[in-house]
Amino acid sequence: MKDKTGEDMTGNENLRKFSEKDRRRDIITYAIMLAFGLIFYFVPGTWIGMEEDSLSYLALERREGVLPGYIAFLSFFKVLFSEEYFLHGVVIAQSFLAIGCTFLFVWVLKKRFNLKGWECILFYLFSMLPFSIYLPEVGITHQILTEGITYAIFYLFIITVLEAVWTLKYKWYLGSMAVAVLLGLIRSQMLFLQVVCLLVLLWITFKRFGGKLVLKLVAVFFILAVGIVLAMGIKIKAAASQFASVIIARGFYEADEEDVELYDDVMMQEIFRKTYKLADENEALHQYAEPGLYMWEDLVHDDIKFYASQALKDYYAEHPDAEIRNAGDIFFELGFKELMEHFDRYLYHSMRLMMPSFIATVFFQIKPIYFLCHIITFFIYFFAIAGTVTTAKLGGGRKVIELMIVVLSVLVVMVVTVNMLFIGLQRYVVYGMGIFYCALYLLCREMAWCLCERSGKKWHLLKAFIGERV
């Protein structure tokens, strides 16, 4: 049957029915995802989790190592609700933020890669992985920590980066910069995202204008960086002193007893001796690191700042007439001098810290099988890299390949930056675990399609199982 224009009305009716059926399937899929999200983010573990760092944030004051973003977030809910109930509001908001951001991430992949309903649900489960590292004790969104919101917002950052890489539009690059700045105002470790944004800018420029302009941009950025360092040396040192606890943790860990000679100031020499004595008694120095596979457990001693603080108190108690100096500046000097004196050892220990960090990006650190964890992680990364190269050679889809390259690049930049400038704790590097497995699945799917088409074999079953190739 045809209408007045000659179009097949039966075909149009079938198309409408097919679209309505697709919409119903999508609604069911999204409802299942939402149900999983509500159960996962609200039910398990302690309702409000408190850590040592939580007290620093709840003080609602800017201090060393505490950035303004999370303080503003907590302050908003304290104004909105009473003192008694505002933390409940924080937990609820953090949980819904996680539900929303991960949902949006899966929705973007669904539109880009024509995911079936069960694939969307699988990806949504993958996206929960970073939030599960402290379960069953407590969920990340129930802790009063910056990770309560940064894990979720990180998915927004990845969305903007992927859209920038796929579309080659600068507006998405600017979007990624905006999210990176937001995350940087919440957590200092998120500064590595600026490196990712720079790589995105260079990639867009290379694809649109060629390699010559990229080389010019690199030269300009290098000259600007050197100029800023030379022109603002004093301010950079002042800014660095705001992160003195990290600097003293990484630097003083490398100290030797004879390093007291590095300090010309009598006061600093005595504070060094007292700090070294306390660190030595608590085995928080490099010589106590267990050799071999488990060395990383002895490389993280962020309590060194407390030994330095005690040393400073003892010094002032013994010298009541001494000039009162800023504690952050003293901590910075103690850490920075040791870093410069033992930079080679610091680099070696940073490399050792990267090993468990790479494990934490895609797997879990399980002490009884810790060596096996290294092997599993190696093969996961090897398969991802080899699979990306193979899929590219087979003529696989550009978006899938670029997705895996973006994810691997972000993970590498994150691990290197966090361990060189900070301390690679598990919760600092687990951000991309779920995203990685989404990318790995899509890569395997694309590879399967390519191999089926190359072999000339029928792939109707594959098509029926995972949908049309995009």
Image: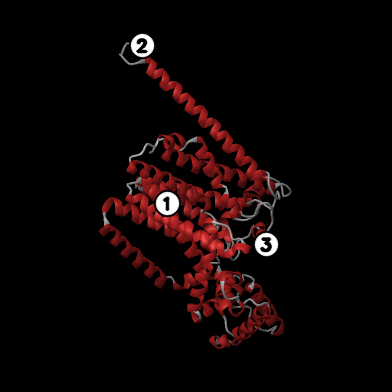
Q: Looking at numbered disc 3 in the image, what kind of residue is underneath it?
A: Glu
Q: Is residue 407 left or right of residue 311?
A: left
Foreground residue among 88 and 236 = 88
Q: Which residue is mark 2?
A: 1
Secondary structure under the numbered disc 2 in the rendered image:
loop
* Relative side of 435 to 283, left or right: left
Classed neighbour count for the residue bearing mark 3: other residues with Cα under 10 Å, few (<14), some (14–19), many (≥20): few
**What residue is pinned by disc 3?**
52
Q: For this rendering, which residue is in front, 389 or 329?
A: 389
Report the amino acid beneath label 1.
Answer: Met
Of labels 3 and 2, earlier in sequence is 2
- Along the polypeptide, which appears first: circle 1 or circle 3? 3
From this view, report whether residue 443 is shown above or below residue 236. above
**On residue 404, which mark appears?**
1
Q: Is residue 53 above or below residue 12?
A: below
Question: Where is 48 relative to 39, above or below?
Answer: below
Q: Is residue 182 above or below residue 101?
A: below
In this orientation, does residue 96 appear? yes
Where does the N terminus fall, quadrant-wise? Answer: top left
Residues at marks 3 and 2, CA–CA distance in whole angstroms: 73 Å
Give the percent coordinates (x, y) of residue 283: 65, 77
**Residue kind at label 2, given as amino acid type:** Met
- Quarter of the view holding residue 397: top left
Asked if labels 2 and 1 touch by Cβ distance under 8 angstroms, the answer is no
Q: Which residue is the extreme one toward the right? A: 84
Q: CA distance from mark 1 to mark 3?
A: 36 Å
